[in-house]
Amino acid sequence: MNLDNATILKLAEHLENAELQAHDVTKITNDYPDMDWDDAYAIQDEIRRRKEARGNKIAGLKCGLTSFAKMKQMGVETPVFGFVADYMSRPDGGEIKHAELIHPKVEAEICIVTKAPLKGPGCHVAAVMAATDFVIPAVEVIDSRYRDFKFDLKSVIADNTSSSRFVIGGTMRNLDELDLRTLGVVLEINGEIRTMAAGAAVLGHPLAAVAMLANHLGARGQEIPAGTFIMTGGVTEAITVNAGDNVNVRFQDLGSVSMRFV
């Protein structure tokens, strides 16, 4: 690590305030070009600690920039990992206040809940399959705190991978009832199809993202506990939404997830 603890605490407060107060900031590596990967995750960890100290619960873990479309869109080659908190959850079919966000975008997510712990190194897709309790659809609303969505990978990790809101669908299925690689997803805004993809867009198989998350945590002496909700990353590219937009995402064999921005 290249940043001292005081700087990590200051940057965590800076980024979390930007999230909670819905104002943008310039990417932090502009001022701290020597920041390394461990620094970035240390800042994210401090944001998590701040939320938990405030009484928030961690609702789940998330993988970001895992689809080939998103990697191309953002000009990166490596997935990132973060978390979602309880207050970020919104009900299926409910409303999301656009004014509470900066420049939100939506993306479809294939998610799982685990029934057994997962720990790296050496975690692989078969291990994730064995540890999966069920599959459930969701839509994530990402909202980078960085001005004009201009960031590098270290800055976005520190910013908790742009987490802001998420909506979980009401249909859950057993893994053996689905082929996650060919599972089709169609994202509509105001009744118009804006993008579509299949699960294989996420690293060839959505559970590969979970294995990478387990290996990432294992390198830090941590594991994914049983009962963890995990978002495997956007299947589609992220689509900008505005106040008044109705979003509906149809998942093959998993039903649909919808919300309205007001």
Image: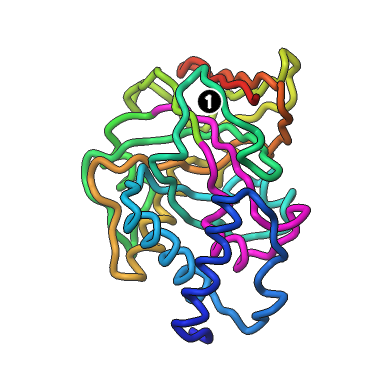
In the rendered structure, the answer to whether residue 18 lies left or right of residue 62 reads right
Identify whether 14 is placed above or below 100. Answer: below
Quadrant in the picture for the C terminus: top right
Look at 43% across and 35% down and name the residue there.
111
In the picture, measured across the screen, residue 53 lies left or right of residue 244, that is left
| Residue 28: in magenta span | no
The x, y position of residue 167, in whole percent, is 49, 29
Q: Identify which residue is drawn at 68% across, 45% down.
A: 102
Q: Residue at x 23, y 39 (%)?
A: 115
> Residue 13 at x, y = what percent?
51, 66
Q: Is residue 121 above or below residue 210?
A: below
The residue tagged 1 is 183
Report the span colored magenta. 136-165
* The one of 237 and 4 positioned closer to us in this rendering: 4
Q: Answer few, some or many: residues within 10 Å of disc 1's Cα (few below 14, many 20 plus, some between 14 and 19).
A: some
Asked if residue 178 is positioned above or below residue 100 in the image, the reply reads: above
Residue 240 picture location, percent across and down: 73, 36
Answer with left or right where residue 54 lies relative to residue 161: left
Q: In this view, which residue lies farthest toward the right?
A: 148
Name which quarter of the figure residue 105 lies in: top right
